[in-house]
Image (tube, helix red, strand yellow):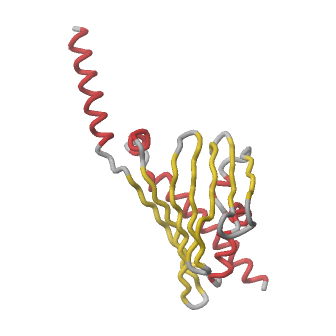
Amino acid sequence: MWKKIALVLGAIVVVLIAVIAMQPSSFSIERSIAIEAPAGIVAAHIQNLRAMDAWSPWAKMDPQMTIAYDGPAAGVRARSSWEGPQMGKGRLTVIAVKPDQEIEMKLEMLKPMAATNRILFSLAPIGATTQVTWHMDGSNGFIGKALSLFIGMDEMVGVPFENGLAALKTVAESEVARR
């Protein structure tokens, strides 16, 4: 009897491992919004990581999180690092800027699970409006693939992206209105 139970459990484990291994190893998430502000104003709120923390959904998710800044205030090599009970430990570094067009960042999650992802903000001016696209891509290890069976990266990250873009819209459009 115990042998049969062990064989069935072993077969279930083997099937589960196979299913997890067949999950995609890479992911890509993207959200966009139209902001009634020039690209320069929008870009300033993205490439300055202190300014970004004012609208970023991640900064609001962990009130006990501590954030430190390093390097220049904005642009290439600007870096923030954080640690908190809910957001874990990580750092974000601006690695490339095409003025008023793109801001590329490297996101390094250190705890609870190590991961490195690429973030790209694309800005497309259309008259007085700027179409902002927030894109993140990366790869999943075995644990990430297993977690994706229960909650997909798009579901886990997409809604915060939408909330962050809405907050960025409010901040940038408010700045335009004050001028």
Residue 19 appears in the figure: yes
Q: Which residue is located at x 68 percent, y 79 percent?
A: 41
Residue 80, percent from left and from top: 69, 56
* Among the 4 quarters of the image, the one containing residue 99: bottom right
18 in relation to 73, above or below: above
- Where is residue 9, by image quadrant? top left
Location of the N terminus by quadrant is top left
- 84 up-or-down from 170: above or below: above
Q: Residue at x 55, y 70 (%)?
A: 121
- Residue at the farthest right position: 178
25 sits left or right of 80 in the view: left
Q: In this orientation, which residue lies closer to the viewer: 131 or 107?
A: 107
Residue lying farthest to the bottom in this orientation: 127
Could one spot residue 33 in this view of the protein?
no
Q: Position of residue 171 (x, y in %)?
A: 70, 72
Name the side, left or right, on which 162 lies relative to 23: right
